[in-house]
Image: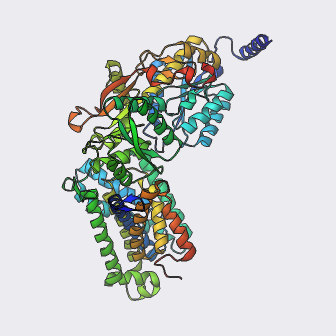
Amino acid sequence: MTMVFGVPLQALLGQLLVGLINGSFYALLSLGLAIIFGLLRIINFAHGAQYMLGAFVAYLLLAYAGIGYWGALILAPLIVGLAGAAIERLALSRLYDLDPLYGLLFTFGLALAIEGSFRYVYGSAGQPYAVPQALTGARNLGFMVLPNYRGWVVVASLAICVATWLAIEKTKFGAYLRAATENPTLVRAFGVNVPLLLTFTYGLGAALAGLAGVMAAPIYQVSPLMGSNIIIVVFAVVVVGGMGSILGAVVTGYMLGLCEGLTKVFYPEASNIVIFVIMAIVLLIRPAGLFGRTA
Amino acid sequence: MKLSAAMAAALLVASALPAAAQVSDNKVKIGILNDQSGVYADFGGKWSYEAAKMAVEDFGGKVLDMPIEVVTADHQNKPDIASNIARQWYDTGQVDAIMELTTSSVALAVQGLSKEKKKINLVTGAATTELTGKQCSPYGFHWAYDTNALAVGTGGALVKAGGDSWFFLTADYAFGYSLEAQTTKFLTSNGGKVVGSVRHPLSNADFSSFLLQAQSSGAKVIGLANAGLDTANAIKQASEFGIVAGGQRLAALLFTLAEVHGLGLEAAQGLSLTEGFYWDRDDASRAFGKRFFERTKRMPNMIQAGTYSGVTHYLKAIARAGTDDTEKVAEAMRAMPVDDVFAKGGIVAKNGRMIHDMYLMEVKKPEESKQPWDYFKVLATVPGDQAYIKPSESGCPLAQ
C-alpha cells in the first residue's frame, strides 16, 4: 500500500474528500456572510442562527406540513430570507448610519434570542431529519465509501457558490448592488431604489444560510446549537478570505475544509483549532486576508 | 468530652427549634440543580424537576406535617455558577438538600460544599465514580449510575456477546478519558482488545473523518466515549456511512432514552447502551412512565426516574428519622433499602453509592417498535454488585 507521511494513501484520499464536504458548508455559509458584509458593512452574527433556522424550517415543514426535503430546499431558504428581509427593514436599516459595532451587537443579540427560544421549545438534543429517499445509500469509490447525500452536498454547494458569484459579479443587477454599496446617493440619483436593494441583499444572505441549514439537516442533528458551533469557524473563513470578498470566501471555505480534514488524520486533537491558527498567521502576514483589498 | 460537646450542640440546636416540629424553617425544601439549557437539557433538565415535583405529590406534599417545596435552577454546566447557587440556597434559601447535579465537575463542587455546610446532596445526573470514591461525603449520595456501571454494562457484557475488538472515539477531556479507560479495563479482563482510538474535540459536529478511521480499523465494536450531541452526531453519521450495516457494532458509553428519542430509531437502531431504568420493564415502571408522560409528553430515562426515586427516598428517610437533621436523615437513608419504581432491592452503601441493577440495552429497529417510546430490547441485566465498585475498594474513607 502506498504510504504518505506514514498514512495510507487511501485513508488520505478519504479524509481529503471528507474535508471537501465540510468545506462545502463553510463555503456556502461564508458566501452569505461575505455578501452581507461586502454590500452592507454589517457583521452578521445572526448568520449561524439563520443556518439553524433553515434546518428547523425544513424539520417543521416535514413534521407539520408533510413537505419533504426537495420542497424544503426551496421553501426554507425563502422563509428564512423573508424573515431576514423583515429584520433588515425593521431594525438593521436604522443602524446603517451608526458605527458598524451596533450592527454586530444587534445581530449577536438576535442570534442569542433566536437560539434561546428554540432551545426552550425543542431542547438541545436535536431533532432527527432523514436523508431524502433518492439520495440514500452510498457508493464505494475504492478508497472510501461515499454516502450519496454527501456527494450531492459537494456538487450542489459548488453550483450555488458559482451561480451566486456570477450573479453578483457579472449581471446588471449585481452591478446595481455593488454600485449601491459604493455610493448609495449617486445610485439613488439614477432612480434606483437603494433601500430595497439592501433589504434584498440581506434577505439573500440569510436565504443562503437557510439553504445551508437545509442541506445540513440530514447530516447533523437539527439542533438549536448547530449554528453557534459553526459560526465562529465561518467567521474565521471570511477573515482569512478577506472580509467582503465573495470569491475569497468560497475558495477559502473549501481550502480550510481540506486543511481541517488533513489535521484530523495527522493530529486529530488540533482539528478544531487549525483554522484559527491559519487565521492568525494570515492576519499577521496579510491583514486584509488572502483575497482582500487593502482599504 | 466529645460526647458532652455533641450533646451540648444537640441541645442548642433543639432549643432553637419549635418543640413540636423537628423540621427546620417549618418546611422541607429540595433544590434541583442541573443543566436546563445546554447539551444536557434533555438528559435531565426540566424533566428532572418535573420528576421531583411528582415524587413530592405522590408523597402527599407533606412530611412530618410540614410542607415540602421543590425549587430549581440552571447551572449551565459551570461549577462556579453551580457553587454560587448552592451557597445561596443553603445560606439564605432554606434549602435542605440539593439533587440531580448533572455534569461531574458540578456534582463534585456541590458535594464538597454540601459536606462543608452539612447538607444532603444526591446526584443522579453526573457520572464520575469520584463522588463515592476519594471525594465521598457522609451526606452525599450517588443514585442512578456511574462510569463504572456503564463500563461494566456496555464494555463487559458486549465482549461476552462476541464484540471482542474495539475502536474508541473519545471526547478529548477528562470524562472521555475516564470512560475509555474504565471500559478498556473490563474489555481486556473479559478477553477483548482495543485495536485503536482517536480523540476528537468536544462539541465536534463532523465525525466522518473519525468514523472512516474506525471503519478501516476492522474493529467489531466502535465505542463512543463521549456524551450528548457529540454521541448523537457520531451515531447519525455512522449510519450514513453504513457502519452498522457493514457489520460493525456501535456502543454508546453514555446515552439514554432521551437521546435515542432525539436521534430517531432509523439512525440509532442496533446501538448498544447501558441504563439503570427502562419504563417498559414491568407494570410499575409502565404505570410510572405513563403518569410521567401525561405531565411531560415524554417517557423518563434513568436520570429522571432516578431523581424521582432519590427525592422519595430522602422524604422517607425524614419520616423515619422524625427530623430533617442532616446527620440523622443521612443515617436513615443508608439504613433503608430502596424499593420503588426505579430500583428493586437497592442498597445505599456507606460511601453513598446506591447499588442497584443496570440493564444492557439494544436499540430496536424501526419495524420492531410497536408504539411511541418503544425503543429498547433488554439484552442483559447486570446485577448491582457487579455493576458498581465494591464500597470497600472505592477509596472512600467512610467505607473502609
Q: In which quarter of the image is the N terminus of chain B?
A: top right
Place of residue A90 in the rendered image (x, y in percent of width and height, measured from the top left) = 44, 66
Q: Is residue B134 placed above or below B217 in the rendered structure? A: above
Please count the marks in the image: 0
On the question of residue B64 being in view, the answer is no
> Which residue sits furthest right?
B1
- Quadrant housing the C terminus of chain B: top right
Locate residue B57, reporting x and y percent: 46, 22
Where residue B52 sits in the image (x, y, percent)? 48, 27
Where residue B374 appears, as percent x and y from the top left, is: 28, 31
> In the image, B294: left or right of B130?
left
Above or below B162: residue B226: below
Compared across the picture, whether A242 is left or right of A190 comes to right
B270 above or below A95? above
Is residue A125 in view from this perspective? yes
Residue B73 relative to residue A238: left or right = right
Toward which corner of the image does residue A123 lie, by quadrant?
Answer: top left
In the shown orientation, is residue B39 left or right of residue B130? left
Residue in front for this viewpoint, A86 or B268: B268
Front residue of B278 and A140: A140
Color scheme of the displayed model: rainbow
Residue at (23%, 59%) from the top-left corner? Answer: A70
Res B377 quadrant in image = top left
Residue at position x 28%, y 71% from top?
A159
In front: A38, or A101?
A38
The residue at the far left in this view is A134
Q: Residue at x 42, y 57 (%)?
A: A265
